Image (cartoon, rainbow, N blue to C red):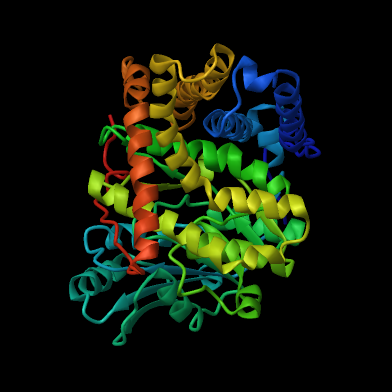
Amino acid sequence: MDIEKKTPMRSAPQSSVGRVTVSLLFFLALLVVIVDLDLFFGTVNAFRIGVGIITSFLIIQAVFNLLTMIFSWNDPHTLADRSFPATFSAPKTSFTALIPVRDEAAVIKQTLKAIDRIEYPDQLKEIIVICRADDKETIAHAIHGCKWLHSEKLQILVSHKDIPNKPASLNLGRRYASGDVIVVFDAEDEPNKDIYSVVNSVFVQENVDVVQAGVQLMNFRSTWYAVLSCLEYYFWFKSSLHAFSHHGVVPLGGNTVFLKKMWLEKIGGWDETKLTEDADIGIRLSAAGAKIRVVYDERHATREEVPPTLSAFVKQRSRWNQGFYQIFLAGEWMGLSGVWRKFLTVYLLLVPLLQLLWFLYIPLMIFLLFTGQVPVLLALFSFIPAYVLVLQVTIFVLGLYDFARAYHLHLPFWYPLKLAFVFFPYQLILAWSSLRGILRLILSHNGWEKTEHFNFHRSAIV
């Protein structure tokens, strides 16, 4: 029996991201040819040619990034089309929730309670917590938390062997999973109580193999960098990820991702050598032909927290960046069909390098401004990326208001000003995280740097 849902279905709009990007490339190439008269009215040399090429490249990247950020707002029907189905189907899919944990005594009881609260037939849901034997405090809190649970299908797997990272924990858990679909939750996650019902509807009605639902960081006032981190998630899951998935490129998130067990078995599970096992498995599933659906609405987004300290934030981003570099070097993305899909995947994997390039480019612009080492036209041209960056700050400010409205959060009147003030220091942190990821890769430091959690997203935000 179907349950009616208010959101109507509409046909998917055509994406303009690819066409606009290609048009921009052509326009910039034409511009360089037209005004090239000795490279913008000056003597040609390697330095000026380099400035022109880097500037053109950064303009294209910045505009492309802006287009993906506003993809879901370009058409009034986009968000409705990429939301959950118009009707909720009767429960059919069985779910196994895998929760890999390590040093999570502070949050595991609340997370177990939140997952158990998901409203779905008990016989169709299962919870598996994966622990290491030496993590006695987390095990004790998990066992203590079990008394709150109604689920009869709960396992706490305790491995006496070394579990080096999250993908190794997930592979251990999937061997014991009995559900048709495996869903990954992180140790601090707060999923929506209807998430299984709506995802079941996607599987039943659309015959897909993988569903990526929304995730949102919530504690935007806890640290100076938290507001931008929260907005990155907001733009990514509400817009940018949909832009990429429209072209068949889906780097899956680390949690609230639902995967048919048969497909996990088909591709051999998660790659335990990758530090971003989520993006890696998304690329491998895409290359293998799995049908992946990305859905989003604020009501059903899983809530998480921003890392509590700057050190933890840098370590988390360094791990992500290093993992992207690992995936790029492994080359499995070459199995994707189509040149455009390969290009977009490489772009996503190398975004950390672009963040580093942006940081290095800023001193170059200042140098050009004060030294006059290049012709005036070329100097002015080199400042276009900075103007686009200012436009990005403006979009972040607008996104902040939308984020607060969508999640019913109190937004202090001075917070947009704070966002603008911390935007460039935040880029410095991202650049350092990118460089740190490169250094770790070169030095073969592949250990998993754990992120601490303190339930900030569950406490009052105001």
Q: Position of residue 148 (x, y in %)?
A: 31, 65
User: Does residue 299 appear anywhere in the picture?
Assistant: yes
Residue furthest left as drawn: 137
**Residue at the limit of the structure toward the bottom, as seen here:** 160
Q: Quadrant of residue 49?
A: top right
- Is the C terminus in the top left, top right, bottom left or bottom right quadrant? top left
Query: Measured along the vertical axis of the image, is residue 119 above or below residue 215?
Result: below
- The answer to whether residue 301 is seen in the rendering is no
Q: Is residue 90 left or right of residue 301?
A: right
Total marks placed: 0
Toward which corner of the image does residue 111 lie, by quadrant? bottom left
Q: Position of residue 424 (x, y in %)?
A: 36, 28
Q: Specify the quadrant that holds the N terminus.
A: bottom right
Q: Position of residue 339 (x, y in %)?
A: 76, 53
Instruction: Please state which of residues 188 and 21 is positioned toward the viewer in this rendering.
Output: 21
User: Is residue 213 depicted above or below 134 in this figure?
Assistant: above
> Taking 251 as reference, is 235 above or below it?
above
